[in-house]
Amino acid sequence: MQVTITRKNAGLSESLKIYLEGKLSGLTKRYGKIIDAHVVMDNEGKEHSVEITLHVSRRTFFSKNKSTNLRLAIDSSVEKLHKQLIKSKEKIRRKGLTPEEAILSGKVIVTETTEEEMVESEVPMLTFEQEEITEEPEERTGT
């Protein structure tokens, strides 16, 4: 994933760059199809604003956040993107495509599942048996 970082009204320290790339790589580990990210940071008095744009296979996700602490604003923006990616992934699953079909069509965000997640997903399903209904003849009245 290619990350472009722009900071207005201040310089970009190496530690901040490493911190931001670490946060974004966390999204990449979970959602494999992230093409690039563009980050714009700005100082407006005592408030810091962070805008992150992600380009993910045929989709674009955007988050903007303001805070007095720059790292807190970055964390909040990344969390918003995380929620957007989860929502997008659930929409794809609801459309009825099998995971293989979705991957082949390029409409899925590939995730890595651990053994713990696989065990948790094997929750027993409830099934209901349909009762046999015997039809009784209706009474006819002479009205």
Image: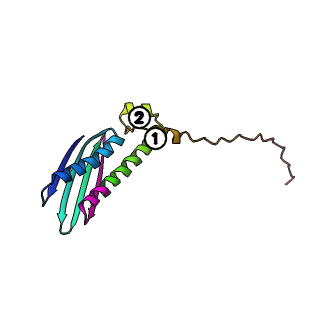
Q: Which residue is mark 2?
A: 102
In the image: residue 112, left or right of residue 8: right
Residue 98 screen position, x and y as percent: 47, 34
The reply to whether the C-beta atoms of the residues labelled 1 and 2 are less than 8 Å apart is: yes
Counting residues from the N terminus, which is met first, the one under dot 1 or under dot 2?
Answer: 1
Q: Secondary structure at mark 1?
A: helix
Query: For residue 102, which quarter of the picture?
Result: top left
From which residue to which does the magenta span run?
A: 57-75
Q: How many angstroms separate mark 1 from mark 2 (CA)?
A: 8 Å
Q: Quarter of the image containing the C terminus?
A: bottom right
Residue 30 screen position, x and y as percent: 36, 42
Residue 121 screen position, x and y as percent: 52, 41
Q: Secondary structure at mark 2?
A: helix
Crowding near pointer 1: few (<14 within 10 Å), some, many (20+)? some
Mark sitting on residue 11: none
Q: Quarter of the image containing the N terminus?
A: top left
Q: Work out whether residue 99 or residue 17 is closer to the camera in this orientation and state it.
A: 17
Query: For residue 32, which quarter of the picture?
Result: top left
Give the amino acid type for the residue marked by disc 1 in the picture: Arg
Q: Is residue 105 magenta?
A: no
Residue at 20% in and 69% down: 46
Give the amino acid type for the residue marked by disc 2 in the picture: Ala
Q: Is residue 69 magenta?
A: yes
Crowding near pointer 2: few (<14 within 10 Å), some, many (20+)? some
Residue at 24% in and 60% down: 70
Residue 39 screen position, x and y as percent: 22, 51
Q: Which residue is mark 1?
A: 93
